Amino acid sequence: MRKTVIVLLCLSVFNTIVVASEASASENIIARIDFSGQEVGNAIPWLTTHGYKLELDAEKLHPRFHDGSIVLSSTEEVAGLVVKKFDQDEYLYNVKAIRIEWGVNRYPQGADWENEINRVPIAVMLSFGTEELPSGLPFGIKAAPYFISPFIGLKEEEGKEYLGKLYKKGGRYYCVASGDQSGKTIITNFEIDQRFKRTFNQPSTPPITAFSFQMNTKDTDGNAEAFLRKVEFIGN
């Protein structure tokens, strides 16, 4: 991925929800991850060819391209993460906000962050810098850089910041859309730079060094389907 200025596409307002307005459409898009142009079918070969790694049980989420998006789905209790670690010359500096085009077709019944059932139909995760912080597991297992993870929820409070059971020092999760919006495309504009500084009490925001997306249906009825169309990184 290279930093480049891309002209915004015109988006139809039919069946589309604008979730937030923290980022202006007039700002520069310095990079874009776009799944909309892929042929229908199994996405795993394309993902592996383009440097993504399937972690945990991501294969069981049947990643596939359909209707201009990458789709994840499950009928069982499973957690999967798809990770793209950037090479050093691909790090994204001075990212002010991101814009995500995504949605949920089926919500996993039982996910409830308010009651510590921290499960998601879909979430995006952005990693910052290379300093590894403790996960909370013994012996430094699975230490990781700072990360921020917006997610779509059903019962959670929209706009609320949540802590996970692990990564309490360096990780935060944010519900960016709530309530049953099955089958609708959601456009999320999500502020990054000031949020990072405020949340982690840091004077500056490190570059984005990795991008991930996930589904987790553990401790739920396991039945979920969600899609991710594109993510745009908006510069300062």
Image (spheres, rainbow, N blue to C red):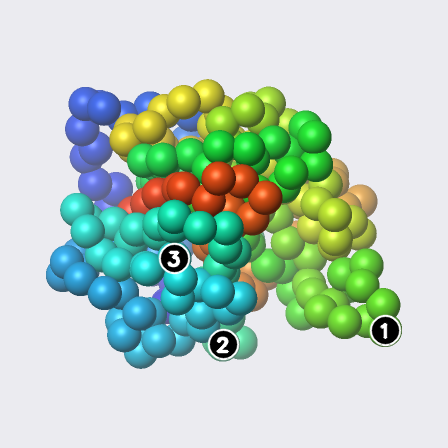
Quick one: label 3 or label 1, which is nearer the N terminus?
Answer: 3
Q: Is residue 187 left or right of residue 193?
A: left
- Amino acid at circle 1: Phe
Residue 181: quarter of image:
top left
Which label is found at residue 87? 2
Q: Is residue 138 left or right of residue 120?
A: right
- Of badges 2 and 1, the one in the foreground is 1
Quarter placement of the N terminus: bottom left
Q: Is residue 159 left or right of residue 13?
A: right
The residue where tag 1 is placed is: 139
Please state which of residues 89 and 98 is positioned toward the viewer in this rendering. 98
Residue at 27% across / 65% down in the picture? 43
Which label is found at residue 61? 3
Residue at 31% across / 78% down in the picture? 49
Query: Whole-percent x and y of residue 173?
Result: 63, 41
CB under 8 Å between callouts 3 and 1?
no
Please state which of residues 185 and 99 is positioned toward the viewer in this rendering. 185
- Of badges 2 and 3, the one in the foreground is 3
Mark 2 vs mark 3, CA separation in Å? 26 Å
Which label is found at residue 236? none
Please state which of residues 139 and 37 is positioned toward the viewer in this rendering. 139
Find numbered disc 3 in the image and state the secondary structure of the residue it sits on: helix
